[in-house]
Image (cartoon, grey):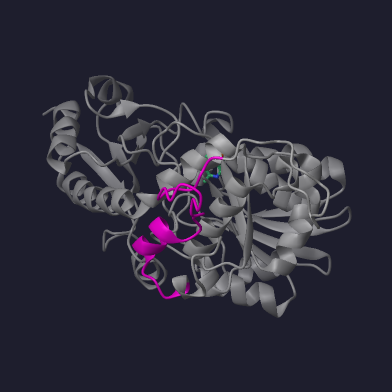
Amino acid sequence: MKPSDGDRKWGFSTRCLHSGSLTDSRKTGLVTPLYPATAFAYLDVDDYAYPRNFNVPNQKVLVEKICALEGAEEGLVFSSGMGAIFTVLLGLLSPGDHAIFQNDLYGGTHYAITSELERMGIDYTFVDKVDEDSLENARHEKTRLVYIETPSNPLLTIIDMQLVAEWASSHGIISCIDNTFASPVVQNPIEFGIDVVMHSATKYLGGHSDLSAGAVVSSARIMEKVLHTAVNTGAVLNAQVCHLLERSIKTLTVRVRQQNRNAMEIAEFLNEHPEVERVFYPGLTTHPGHELARKQMKDYGAMLSFEVKGDPDEFVSRLRLIAPAMSLGGVESTVTSPRLTSHAKPGPEARQKAGIRDNLLRLSVGIEEADDLKEDLDQALGL
Ligand SMILES: *Cc1c(COP(=O)(O)O)cnc(C)c1O
């Protein structure tokens, strides 16, 4: 199943394409065959295959590919990002343990923490700013895990991954990151010492707004614990979707590079636009996290947000090409209003505290021609 151990030397795009693919020895086809079976023979095998044992061929091939992209030893794929994230938390934390979370996490993760962990006797602290002081203030002897997201949603705050990883390892704490917003093309947290990397593969890895999946990669030691819980939570990805996701990842680099290029161009365009108040994009030298982004990201990603001077809802309704749609990371550009979507539930006060103004819009930049996107934004901003 492993093409060769040499694939670690391959460049990123080559790994997207060739790592973790199973050759079709019978018919010599170039792509991994689809194995839809849920029943496999158990006689004369050490470890019989079963989807919920996370060991059917299409799962294993896909995991190998994602591990090659993140430089990880082992991994698992799930039926959603939340399936992956919650299984990690459940697998690595026990009653009485304490965990530290960045406050501006993906809304679904934030909700899972506040609505489930306490009930299970797991203690936690949210920190507004992730730096050594805030981590040290939040830490106590039962702290087992620290969890971050960078760039963050929706203000694209950049967190120092190396600082978090080194602080955590010096205290025997497991460091985790949700790498969905960046994608493995843009950032590989394991290079900076982070222990566990999670993805909502529904976003960039899938990339076509047509599948739901999640992934976790880490060391073999940590993944053994996660697997133990994963078998019980059962959020498995079936072979058909594994196959679709494997196919999607082959074009990950070309998609995301074009998305990043477009995002940079659009960020600069919006930054100069008289009808735009502020732009949040780590690629802009004016972004407070720009220097850190240069250090730890290979590119600046394709997510950005901006504040419009006029009515944000009217702006959205005037867009013709960019779709007002939830989710992100697809080949088509989409826009959301955090006030009405991800940050509707916390309410106006919490939004204000987090610096999320009512005129903020979040853009997930697609692979269209940048000129077409700029033209659409320009006509919707209206002058
Ligand atoms: C979408 C998303 C998730 C959750 O993933 P699902 O596939 O919807 O379960 C987690 N983290 C981030 C950053 C996301 O954007």
Q: Position of residue 338 (x, y in %)?
A: 44, 34
Residue 108: name its quadrant: top right
Count how many numbered circles sit on residues in the image.
0
Q: Does the magenta stretch mainly form a helix, a strand or a loop? A: loop
Against 339, is 104 above or below?
Answer: below
Q: x, y percentage for residue 106?
A: 55, 43
Identify the residue at image location x=78%, y=46%.
231
166 left or right, relative to 116: left
Q: Residue furthest bottom?
A: 170
Q: Residue at x 79, y 54 (%)?
A: 47
Tell which of 111 and 129 is nearer to you: 111
Ligand 1 is found in the corner quadrant, namely top right
Left or right of 60 on screen, residue 310: left
Q: In the rendering, at what x and y percent does residue 252 appear?
A: 37, 51
Looking at the rendered image, the quarter that the N terminus falls into is bottom right
Which one is nearer the viewer's eye here, 73 or 138? 73
On whether residue 80 falls in the magenta region, the answer is no
Front residue of 368 and 159: 368
Q: Residue at x 57, y 47 (%)?
A: 105
The image quadrant where one finds the C terminus is top left
Q: Residue at x 14, y 35 (%)?
A: 372
Q: Is residue 202 visible?
A: no
Residue bounds of the magenta highlight = 8-34
Instruction: Name the spot of residue 154 as percent of width and height, x first.
Output: 44, 44
Return the residue nearer the eye: 184 or 362: 184
Q: Is residue 57 visible?
A: yes
Position of residue 293 in the picture relative to residue 43 (left or right): left
**Residue 9 in magenta?**
yes
